[in-house]
Amino acid sequence: MKSLAQNLSLAANKPNLVLRSLCEADLQTLLHIESISYSHPWSQNNFLDSLSSHYLMQGLFDSSTCSPKSSMIGYFVAMKGVDELHLLNLTVAPDYHRRGYAKYLLSQLKILSVQQELNWIWLEVRMSNQAAIALYTSYGFIKSGVRKNYYPLGLKGSNDREDALLMSYQVTPCN
Ligand SMILES: CC(C)(COP(=O)(O)OP(=O)(O)OC[C@H]1O[C@@H](n2cnc3c(N)ncnc32)[C@H](O)[C@@H]1OP(=O)(O)O)[C@@H](O)C(=O)NCCC(=O)NCCS
């Protein structure tokens, strides 16, 4: 497992990286990345509801690129609970896969958890999403349960559902 320091060194090696809060002006880019990343992407209303609920929403950008669409590398959306952050969305644009950006975003989420004295990060992931499960496992998340029939499956209108794996990560300032 890579340490937080190793993940943060990504930022030191790439001075063009900018992490900032997402806003309504980012919607078109978010919807584009969603559409090329998921079989069942988040809708505009999902993002608008998250913004109006003041969820934690941050985007990672490459400031050396001019076009807004190509400059957004990835993003996360998380909801604050009593003692935990619930990660609702973590996405890295396909052009940027396997360069450590998702781990970097998770390390930023962890920093926010420490700052807000939240001890856990929870998430659901599709049972079939092997890439994401490998990512979370390599970061230190553990399998904590199964939510039956949690996600829609197949074409719009289909009644097919897919189980979610529930995963959790205990936040300590040193891990
Ligand atoms: C899952 C996702 C966020 C990973 O983003 P990424 O920036 O490519 O991930 P990283 O480069 O930080 O990968 C870190 C580690 O995760 C694991 N991993 C990531 N993608 C993987 C893949 N396709 N297959 C196997 N392992 C993978 C590896 O252990 C990897 O370390 P390595 O590259 O040194 O082997 C990205 O593929 C994505 O956005 N997918 C579509 C959206 C999605 O499924 N989001 C998660 C919803 S729960």
Image (cartoon, rainbow, N blue to C red):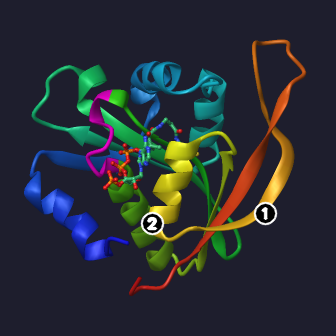
Q: Quadrant of residue 130?
A: top right
SS assignment at label 1: strand
Task: Tell me if 156 is positioned left or right of 160 in this view.
Answer: left
Circle 2 residues within 10 Å: few <14, some 14–19, many ≥20: some
Compared to 13, does 151 lie above or below?
A: above
Given residues 10 and 42, the one toward you in this image is 10
7 or 26: nearer the viewer:
7
Disc on res. 93: none
Q: Left or right? Give the position of 82 relative to 31.
A: right
In the rendered structure, which amino acid carries the disc numbered 1? Gly
Residue pictured at 83% horizontal, 52% vertical: 147
In-front residue for pair 56/53: 56
Tags 2 and 1 touching, CB below 8 Å: no
Q: Secondary structure at mark 2?
A: helix
Q: Quadrant of residue 63?
A: top left
- Is 21 one of the magenta-colored residues? no
Which amino acid does the dot numbered 2 rest on? Answer: Tyr
Per the image, the residue denoted by label 2 is 139
Q: Quadrant of the C terminus?
A: bottom left
Q: Nearer the viewer, residue 166 or 12?
A: 166
User: Cα distance, mark 2 to mark 1?
Assistant: 18 Å
Residue under label 1:
145
Residue 113, position in %: x, y?
Answer: 50, 72
Magenta segment boundaries in residue numbering: 95-101
Image location of residue 25, percent across then percent down:
40, 26
Q: Position of residue 106 (x, y in %)?
A: 42, 60
Counting residues from the start of the chain, the first of labels 2 and 1 encountered is: 2
Name the residue located 38 percent from the left edge and 87 percent from the top edge. Answer: 174
- Crowdedness near tag 1: few (<14), some (14–19) or many (≥20) residues, C-alpha within 10 Å: few
Cβ of mark 2 under 8 A from ligand 1: yes
Q: Which residue is depicted at the point 90% across and 21% down?
A: 159
